[in-house]
Image (spheres, rainbow, N blue to C red):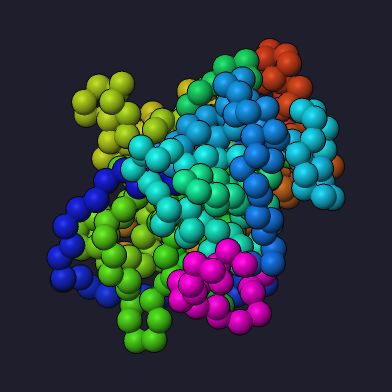
């Protein structure tokens, strides 16, 4: 949930197209998500209202050793509740949850907390994180999510350790596809929500590496009627926000597509969108990588060295082409998320025919990755790498 900066808004922009979608997981009717009072939002029947004392028990009093991490909203703690009654239980029993506690000194606040409840209280999709409930008691504001054992994509791409091994190419592509499906759902005609904070730390990973998008604190309803954009204050995270949105404050679904392009580039390169630890000309990933992405022969120069060359070069070229389209300066020329999903699905089918990937093979992929964390040497030897490299062409 990152609102790291804001900027002045001007009033001149070329109206980009609105996105279309034929997603099957659409909600039955267009709900005016932002037109509800706080009371109506909090009464969402899907969500449990937790007492602060219960969340204290569930997280062992927000003990430092249950701390999962910290973002702009505040700290996130691991906890346990009974899966039926949702009452706090002993650590290690019942349903594992992640409890996000608003830091009152932070730069986010009540509005982001309520926006998250507003959207996640209504939207349901296999690639969106499940919000179990919330707490609003005196000055306390908390959010309770299902726990994602594999944390975020950010952890796996940039914080490699014995816990987070480098992700193999096929798993990266599976994650890209599912994240794209999450955005496609949000952009679908019956929902039209602009996520506005799409980045690798907001792509959470379940035990089988299924993607769950999280952090809807900055999300916005898409334009309604004749309008092709929403005028807003510029909020988001440096390195991921679309240039026209930063310049004008005019937000469209294509702003999310740009951010998706940045994440796709992070997935390919294993580098952060902005990284001050890199030499100055390499700190801005999009700026640095674009010339390499345009040149098939030089593409390998930006590929994550941790994959050790274990990717199909034709596949990488197609992904680079897709990323370039998403990163197009003129939003009108960016693809819709449905088009992105279609291309990534086609790529996956291509690999599947080339390597006879079946559901069993997909399980093996995750299994193999998981066991490689116990035995790092297995990464290089993992069987799923080799046919992929050898058999994909074109
Ligand atoms: N449901 C969850 N299950 C497991 N870990 C989670 C969950 N939600 C968040 N985390 C972890 O908590 C940490 C903080 O997440 P948070 O979403 O608050 O911030 P962020 O996305 O990293 O940064 P920012 O606030 O700038 O967007 C991250 O490391 C993330 O992986
Ligand atoms: Mg987050």
- Give percent across and percent down for residue 237: 34, 45
In the depicted structure, whether residue 243 falls above or below residue 25: above
In the depicted structure, whether residue 349 falls above or below residue 158: below
Can residue 38 be found in the magenta stretch?
A: yes
Between 121 and 187, which is closer to the camera in this rendering? 121
Residue furthest to the front: 138
- Give percent across and percent down for residue 291: 29, 40
Between 185 and 77, which is closer to the camera in this rendering? 77
- Specify whether 106 is left or right of 339: left
Between 284 and 75, which is closer to the camera in this rendering? 75
Identify the image quadrant of residue 58: top right
- Give percent across and percent down for residue 323: 42, 50
What residue is rendered at 63% in x and 73% in y?
Answer: 26
- The answer to whether residue 391 of the structure is visible from this angle is no
What residue is rendered at 18% in x and 62% in y?
Answer: 9
Can residue 132 be found in the magenta stretch?
A: no
Point out the stretch of residues depicted in magenta. 25-43
Identify the image quadrant of residue 34: bottom left
- Specify whether 209 is left or right of 305: right
């Amino acid at each position: 949930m990152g609102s790291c900066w804001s900027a002045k808004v001007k009033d001149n922009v070329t109206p980009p197209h609105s996105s279309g979608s034929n997603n099957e997981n659409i909600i039955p009717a267009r709900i005016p998500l932002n037109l509800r009072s706080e009371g109506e939002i909090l009464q969402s029947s899907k969500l449990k209202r937790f007492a602060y004392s219960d969340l204290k028990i569930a997280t062992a009093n927000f003990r430092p050793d249950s701390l999962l991490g910290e973002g702009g909203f505040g700290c996130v703690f691991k906890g346990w509740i009974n899966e039926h009654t949702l009452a706090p239980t002993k650590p290690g029993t019942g349903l594992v949850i992640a409890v996000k506690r608003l830091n009152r000194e932070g730069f986010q606040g009540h509005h982001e907390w309520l926006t998250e409840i507003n959207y996640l209280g209504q939207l349901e999709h296999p690639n969106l994180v499940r919000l179990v409930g919330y707490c609003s008691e005196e000055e306390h504001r908390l959010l309770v999510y299902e726990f994602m054992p594999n944390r975020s994509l950010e952890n796996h791409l940039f914080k490699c350790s014995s816990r987070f091994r480098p992700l193999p190419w096929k798993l990266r592509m599976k994650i890209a596809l599912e994240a794209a499906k999450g955005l496609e759902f949000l952009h679908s005609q019956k929902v039209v929500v602009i996520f506005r904070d799409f980045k690798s730390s907001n792509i959470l990973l379940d035990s089988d590496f299924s993607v769950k998008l999280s952090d809807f604190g900055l999300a916005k309803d898409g334009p309604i009627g004749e309008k092709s954009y929403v005028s807003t204050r510029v909020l988001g995270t440096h390195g991921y926000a679309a240039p026209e949105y930063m310049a004008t404050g005019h937000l469209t679904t294509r702003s999310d597509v740009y951010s998706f392009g940045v994440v796709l580039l992070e997935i390919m390169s294993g580098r952060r969108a902005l990284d001050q630890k890199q030499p100055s000309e390499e700190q801005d990933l999009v700026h640095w990588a674009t010339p390499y992405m345009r040149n098939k022969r030089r593409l390998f120069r930006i590929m994550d060295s941790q994959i050790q060359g274990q990717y199909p070069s034709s596949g990488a070229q197609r992904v680079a082409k897709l990323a370039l389209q998403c990163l197009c300066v003129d939003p009108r020329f960016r693809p819709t998320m449905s088009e992105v999903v279609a291309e990534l699905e086609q790529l996956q089918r291509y690999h599947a025919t080339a390597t006879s990937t079946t559901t069993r093979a997909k399980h093996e992929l995750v299994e193999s990755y998981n066991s490689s964390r116990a035995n790092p040497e297995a990464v290089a030897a993992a069987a799923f790498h080799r046919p992929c490299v050898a058999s994909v062409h074109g």
